[in-house]
Amino acid sequence: MGKLHMRTKKDNREYDITIDEGKGKFDMPIFAKDDWLVMDKFFEEKTTRTMVYYSIKKEVPRSCIESAEFIIQTLRGREPTDWQPGQSAQPNIYAHWGEGGVINISKSEDVVDQLSGKKALPFNEREEGGYYEFTQGLGLMIGNVAEKDTKDRYNMHLGAVVANHVDYLAAIYSDESEPDKDEDIVLINPWRIKGIQKPDEFRGDTYKDENIYKLGLLLPSETLPEGR
């Protein structure tokens, strides 16, 4: 699945950050270790002679919506702490859109049907009034707001922040995909991760059409943070 390379700068020197996608780990030079904030409930630190890297230690559901919900809930004190198919848990997770649009993804069985007409949340690069969230315990959702269904069945995708850089606009998101329609959702480890440097990169190749697919923010709250 390839490696994602990010170039970052510290102390006037440039370093490469290598994220090994799809294998459940991302590697970085030892000198960069302290620059990353990692969800220790899901990752454990491992050391080699020349490298320090973080490896996934906790299973998540094989589903983009279930895994994103589970990760965010776990960081926010999920009850019950384990995961079972069809199980209801707290806190509820909400997808926030522009102009006050909100979807409770924890309670809705028809999330796709509620996407129609939703507006994109203004993910501006830290401009006043904009959202540029790379904080653990939040997530991104991209959805088809123009049609009820698409021919290729890719109507939405969700990911939760599992690691973020303390100085630079770089984050690691969960990037698990849905199982085939005739397969059950099961717990898996390792699971896919994705590195991005701005929210719009969450689109990938599948969701590039900005007229059809809009970006929203996942929060364990029915309201956006005060002042946003």
Image (spheres, rainbow, N blue to C red):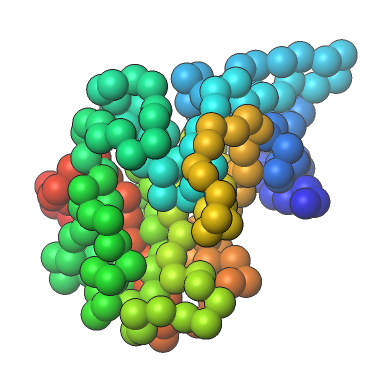
From the viewer's perspective, tell me whether residue 92 is left or right of residue 37: left
From the viewer's perspective, tell me whether residue 113 is left or right of residue 14: left
Rendered residue at 27%/78% (across/down) = 116
Q: Image quarter for residue 10?
A: top right
Q: Nearer the viewer, residue 183 or 162?
A: 183
Q: Nearer the viewer, residue 87 or 177?
A: 87
Rendered residue at 28%/71% (across/down) = 113
Q: Position of residue 75 (x, y in %)?
A: 36, 27
Q: Position of residue 125 (x, y in %)?
A: 41, 61
Q: Image quarter for residue 86?
A: top left
Q: Quadrant of the C terminus?
A: bottom left
Q: Nearer the viewer, residue 155 or 165?
A: 155
Whether residue 85 is visible to the viewer of this picture, yes or no, is yes
Whether residue 125 is visible to the viewer of this picture, yes or no, is no
Q: Position of residue 124 (x, y in %)?
A: 36, 65
190 up-or-down from 219: above or below: above
Q: Position of residue 39 (x, y in %)?
A: 48, 26
